[in-house]
């Protein structure tokens, strides 16, 4: 029996080494095959994205147009839901099964791939860069090199229930003090002034981002992020944290907000049923309303995050996230074709369809939105003195995670504003050294 | 006579070598049957475990082709990381609940089903249902149950005059809420194990105990429970390993927020690996989870064998 065990062990160990060897060999050989262009050879391009519903339909249409121009090419789109997307992409990019074209949010997440030399540098490819809104392109530009083409710009603003506002004699708040006053009035009327589902941590982070922008202006973040003398422990961030906790103390939000997942819909339900009056949310909410509770659209209004009377920030400043950003992985054997594909995915035609069907403005010039909300959002973007991209997409992943965590704890009052700001600065300094 | 004996021993030797040959042939046959299984086992179990340990010695973001060997640096960082200790503590609460709530609950349900209670079949289905549902669905369902404003649980509390609890938002309450769901979902699994074991206890033992004048409680403690010890031990092993590895329910019900009060090793590992791009550090967490689970299982097995020796079973 003993020798049987020994043989078994030997086989298993051998197997492990064989597998390990296989894995390494693959990485070294397959690079040599290069692109074959213009032939009749059947070619398949893989495309990964994370947008279901209307947005996916827009991509399908763009793919159809692309395939008509290239009859020998088939594009295989794959939709992976948000949560799993990051995980699948990391694993795929590490191996040899990376998709040719994939969507992301740009920022620090995409930069990880760029720094690891996994992306095609798009700077000198056959792309007409003049069609993009400049700021939006910044989100996928690292060290003067472009690694992704933006399509949508999702702005963050307050949605409110016009009926409730009218009933309680509230005007749309222009200043932060007016917002606080309306919160008190709504509270007295037995409503939840603001709906918040903060379990995923990003909805709450919007408040910190906007408040910091209104208190100290856009340069506070920029100089802290670029490590140009700025600091995440700046008094602006401490003040923003205090103001968040002030909102919590005023009971501006529904109870138990830190335990509510956003996607499951509890916060949206409160808005639809008139239990809550306002919500700070992305442009995507317009889409949610049309899908989930179209009757609400009649009552729905939007307003920008109010100005702060004694703040340094420009009140036209807006926060917005760029998504999707289309990039090409370096392991793709069809890089030229992939460039043409992402050109189609960010064409004026695709942009127009995206703006009209998804309720979200686009990063492409020359698109005339028909949708009323998109028109408003686009006006805000055009009038904005600066656009702040969400911290959790801009910062390096580790710092982004800490930012969400500390803000979550500010809302839960398990951390003081000072502690949160200092923890951020400590991590930022630590990462800078690396 | 002498000659005959010699022939005999020659024959014996011969038989021995033949036997040995046959044995080695047998081994080959056994191996050839096992090869596929061994191959699959190597590919899907051994290889990942070993690569996890290898990755744990590297500083690697998971996508780069070059990775830097850092020796035990990841391990020393892990041991000084407060999130690790908090996650580990939470995992041990989880182990506690699994062993001391889920298993007794499962045993109780099995006993109920084993008695001649009315509506036994219906109860069987009702008890077993939670285990049949997918964990993501269970998680979402309970998120609605625990809803702070409209949730049935808070509504029930209110009707008894108790104030609403913000279950999933509070610091100990979120963990407690998830542990309740955990027990609810997995107790039926142990119920099935115990049910099968209860059927296997011979009726004669109960009859004999009855003749000796044992009442029902004594029968339980002196007949049923001792007969169930092997199952109790294997259930404990399953419960401990399962609760150290768990991930999905916590991920659905509380998000992946490490450093928050509901962080466990599974979510901590996920976050470091796939959100923070630290494959090396994530692998270190995975390796520690493996080692901790292994230690726990070894301890249980040792206790088990000591117990058996004491009772003279081996």
Image (tube, coloured by chain):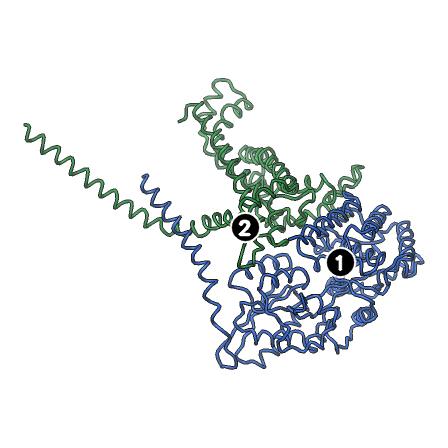
Instruction: Name the tint of chain A in the rendering.
Output: blue
Left or right: B212 with respect to B151?
left
Query: Element under label 1?
Result: loop
Say if B275 sits above or below B242 in the image. below
Extreme right residue here?
Answer: A169
Which x, y percent locates residue A122? 62, 72
Q: Which residue: 81% across, 37% down? A: B161
Which x, y percent locates residue A207? 80, 55
Residue B107 or B263: which is nearer the viewer? B263
- Circle 2 marks a residue in which chain? B
Query: Element under label 2?
Result: strand
Q: State which chain is coloured green.
A: B
Kindly identify which residue carries mark 2.
B58
Kindly identify which residue carries mark 1.
A228
Which x, y percent locates residue A341? 60, 75
Say if A247 sits above or below B5 in the image. below
């Amino acid at each position: 029996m003993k020798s049987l065990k020994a043989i078994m062990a030997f086989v298993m160990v051998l197997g492990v080494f064989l597998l390990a060897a296989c894995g390494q060999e693959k990485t070294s050989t397959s690079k040599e095959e290069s692109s074959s262009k213009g032939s009749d050879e059947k070619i398949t391009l893989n495309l990964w994205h994370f947008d279901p519903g209307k947005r996916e339909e827009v991509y399908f249409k763009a793919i159809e147009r692309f395939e008509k121009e290239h009859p020998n090419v088939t594009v295989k789109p794959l939709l992976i839901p948000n949560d799993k997307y990051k995980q699948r992409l990391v694993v795929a990019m590490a191996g040899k099964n990376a998709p040719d074209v994939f969507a992301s949010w740009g920022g620090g997440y995409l930069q990880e791939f760029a720094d690891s030399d996994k992306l095609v540098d798009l700077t000198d490819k056959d792309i007409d860069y003049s069609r993009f809104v400049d700021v939006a392109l910044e989100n996928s530009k690292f060290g003067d090199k472009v690694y992704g083409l933006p399509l949508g710009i999702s702005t963050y603003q307050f949605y409110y229930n016009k009926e409730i506002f009218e009933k309680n004699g509230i005007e749309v708040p222009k200043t932060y003090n007016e917002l606080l006053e309306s919160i008190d009035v709504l509270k007295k009327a037995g409503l939840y002034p603001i709906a918040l589902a903060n379990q995923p941590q990003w909805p709450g982070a919007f408040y910190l981002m906007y408040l910091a922008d209104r208190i100290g202006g856009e340069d506070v973040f920029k100089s802290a992020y670029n490590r140009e003398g700025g600091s995440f422990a700046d008094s602006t961030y401490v003040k923003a944290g205090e103001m968040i906790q002030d909102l919590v103390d005023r009971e501006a939000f529904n109870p138990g907000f830190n335990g509510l997942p956003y996607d499951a819909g509890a916060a949206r339900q409160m808005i639809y049923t008139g239990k809550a009056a306002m919500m700070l949310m992305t442009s995507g909410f317009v889409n949610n309303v049309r899908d989930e509770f179209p009757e609400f659209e009649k009552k729905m209004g939007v307003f920008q995050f109010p100005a702060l009377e004694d703040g340094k920030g420009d009140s036209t400043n807006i926060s917005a996230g760029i998504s999707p950003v289309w990039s090409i992985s370096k392991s793709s054997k069809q890089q030229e074709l992939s460039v043409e594909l992402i050109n189609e995915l960010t064409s004026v035609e695709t942009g127009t369809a995206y703006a009209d069907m998804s309720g979200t403005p686009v990063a492409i010039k020359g698109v005339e939105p028909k949708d009323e909300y998109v028109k408003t959002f686009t006006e805000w973007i055009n009038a904005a003195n600066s656009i702040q991209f969400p911290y959790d997409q801009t910062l390096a992943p580790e710092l982004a995670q800490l930012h969400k965590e500390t803000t979550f704890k500010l809302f839960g009052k398990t951390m003081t504003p000072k502690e949160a700001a200092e923890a951020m600065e400590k991590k930022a300094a630590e990462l800078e050294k690396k | 006579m002498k000659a005959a004996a010699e022939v005999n021993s020659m024959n014996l030797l011969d038989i021995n070598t033949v036997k040995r040959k046959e044995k080695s042939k047998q081994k080959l046959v056994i191996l050839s049957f096992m090869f596929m299984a061994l191959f699959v086992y190597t590919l899907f179990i051994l290889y990942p475990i070993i690569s996890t340990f290898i990755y744990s010695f590297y500083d690697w973001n998971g996508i780069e082709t070059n990775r830097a060997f850092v020796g035990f640096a990841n391990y020393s960082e892990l041991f000084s990381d407060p999130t690790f200790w908090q996650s580990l503590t939470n995992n041990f609460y989880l182990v506690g609940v699994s062993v001391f709530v889920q298993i007794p609950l499962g045993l109780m349900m099995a006993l109920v089903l084993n008695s001649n209670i009315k509506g036994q079949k219906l109860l069987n289905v009702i008890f077993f249902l939670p285990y049949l549902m997918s964990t993501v669905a269970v998680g979402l369902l309970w998120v609605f149950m625990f809803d702070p404003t409209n949730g049935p649980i808070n509504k029930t509390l209110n009707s008894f005059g108790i104030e609403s609890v913000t279950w999933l938002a509070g610091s100990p309450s979120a963990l407690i809420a998830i542990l309740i769901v955990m027990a609810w979902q997995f107790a039926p699994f142990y119920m099935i194990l115990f049910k099968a074991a209860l059927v296997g206890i011979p009726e004669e033992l109960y009859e004999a105990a009855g003749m000796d004048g044992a009442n029902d409680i004594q029968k339980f403690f002196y007949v049923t429970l001792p007969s169930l010890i092997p199952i109790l031990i294997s259930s404990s092993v399953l419960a401990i390993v399962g609760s150290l590895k768990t991930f999905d329910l916590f991920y659905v019900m509380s998000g992946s927020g490490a450093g928050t009060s509901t962080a466990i090793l599974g979510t901590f590992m996920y976050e470091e690996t796939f959100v923070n791009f630290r494959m090396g550090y994530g692998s270190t967490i995975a390796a520690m989870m493996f080692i901790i689970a292994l230690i726990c299982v070894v301890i249980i097995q040792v206790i088990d064998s000591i117990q058996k020796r004491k009772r003279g079973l081996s």
